[in-house]
Amino acid sequence: MRSALDVMGGDLGPRATVDGAYLYLKEAPKDDHIVLVGDQDLIKERLKHIPEKYHKRFSIVHAPDNIGMNESPTEAFKKKTNASMVVGLKLHASGQADAFVSAGHTGAQMAGSLLTLKRIPGVKRPAIGSFLPSEKGMVFLIDVGANVDSKPIHLLQFALMASIFVGEVFQQKDLKIGLLSIGEEEKKGNALTLAAHQLFKENLPNFYGNVEGRDILKGKTDIIVCDGFVGNALLKMAESVMGVIVKAIKRNIGANLFTNLGALLVKPAFSELKRSYDYQEYGGVPLLGVDGISIICHGNSTARAIKNALRVAHEMSSHQVNKRIAEKLREKELNNA
C-alpha cells in the first residue's frame, strides 16, 4: 500500500508526522510505502533521525504551502495549489497514492476530499465519526461535524457506513446502533429523530433504539448516530472531560501522606485508564462516504497517533470498506431514497 501523508499538517509538524510514518513502517507489511508531502527541506532534515534502512520506503513530494486554521476551507483549497493537503489529496485522487492522512485543517480536508475524491455511488452526504470512551470500551459517534443539517435518510446512511467501518477495521461483530434523542421512547425527539427512528427500524436489524446523552458513556450501544451539529457540540464537551478529571485528581493528591501512598497504589490503574481512553490509540478517522480513503487526525497528533492513523488507512484498504459501503447501499436500495 502507498499512503500519502501531509507532513505539514498538525500542531507538531514534521517531527510528529515523519516519526509517526517511521513507527508505522516498522510494523507494516514490507511493501508498504509512505509518500511524504510537504516542504522537502524540512522532510529531509527530519529523515536524518530515521534509520537509513527505512529511507527507501519513503518518497518526497515537495509542497511548501500549508492551509492555516483561520482560512476559509473551500477557498484555501482551491487557491493554495501548492499546499501539502491539496497536493496529497490530488495524489490520492489520481491513483498515485492509495490513501491520504492529515492532521491539518479539518474543514479543508473535508471540503477538499469531497472536491477531489467525490462521493461513493449512492452516498448522499459524507460524514465523520469519533471514538468516545464508555464503560464497555469505546463507542463510535457519527456525525460529529461534517453536516450541521441532516435528513433522516442521511442519518440512516451514516449508521450503515459506521457499522461497516467499525466492524471491518476493528473486527467487531454484532454491533448495536443507537439513535441519539431526548428519551428512549420511540415517540420522543424532534422531527428528524422521529422520522429517522422509523427508517432505522425498517432497515437496521441491529438497531437498539433511542439512546440519551447519559447512555453514551454507559456503552449501551457500539455506534451512536446524530446530526453533525449535535455531534460536534457533544464531541468538544467530551474532549474536555478527561482533562478536568486529571486536574481534579492532581489537586487532591499530595494533601497528606495517606493520599500520596494511595496515589502510588492506583498509578498503574490510572495510567491504563488514560491509555484506553486516549484518542492516539485510534489515530484518526475517515471521512466516510467519499470515494477514497481520507483519514482525519487530531490537530495535536503525536507520532503514535500518526502511526495508528496510517494503520487505519491500511485496514480500510485491505478490508475494502468503501466497496462494502457501496454494496450495502445498493442492497438496501437507499441510494435513491
Image (cartoon, grey):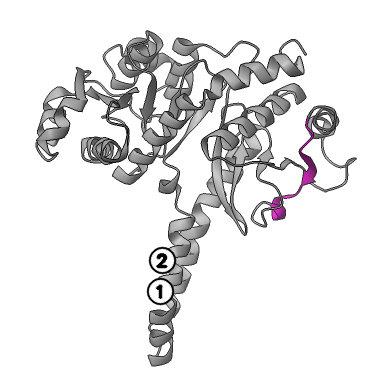
Q: Which residues are magenta?
A: 204-215
- Look at the image and tell me in which quarter the C terminus lies: top right
Residues 300 and 210: in front is: 210
How many numbered marks appear?
A: 2
Q: Answer above or below: position of 215 versus 261.
A: above
Q: Residue at x 68, y 31 (%)?
A: 159
Q: Amino acid at mark 2?
A: Ser
Whether the magenta-drawn stretch holds residue 278 is answered as: no
Q: Residue furthest bottom?
A: 257
Q: Answer above or below: position of 40 versus 175.
A: above
Q: Residue at x 10, y 33 (%)?
A: 45
**Circle 2 residue:** 271
| Residue 187 lies in quadrant | top right
Residues 320 and 286: in front is: 320
Q: Residue at x 20, y 21 (%)?
A: 59
Q: Is residue 228 visible?
A: no
Q: Residue furthest top?
A: 94
Picture coordinates of residue 151, whole percent (x, y): 74, 23
- Look at the image and tell me in which quarter the N terminus lies: top left
| Residue 198 lies in quadrant | top right
**Circle 1 residue:** 267
Does dot 1 land on a helix, a strand or a loop? helix
Picture coordinates of residue 327, whole percent (x, y): 65, 17
Q: Are marks 1 and 2 in contact (CB under 8 Å)?
A: yes
Cα separation between marks 1 and 2: 6 Å
Q: Answer above or below: position of 296 versus 328.
A: below
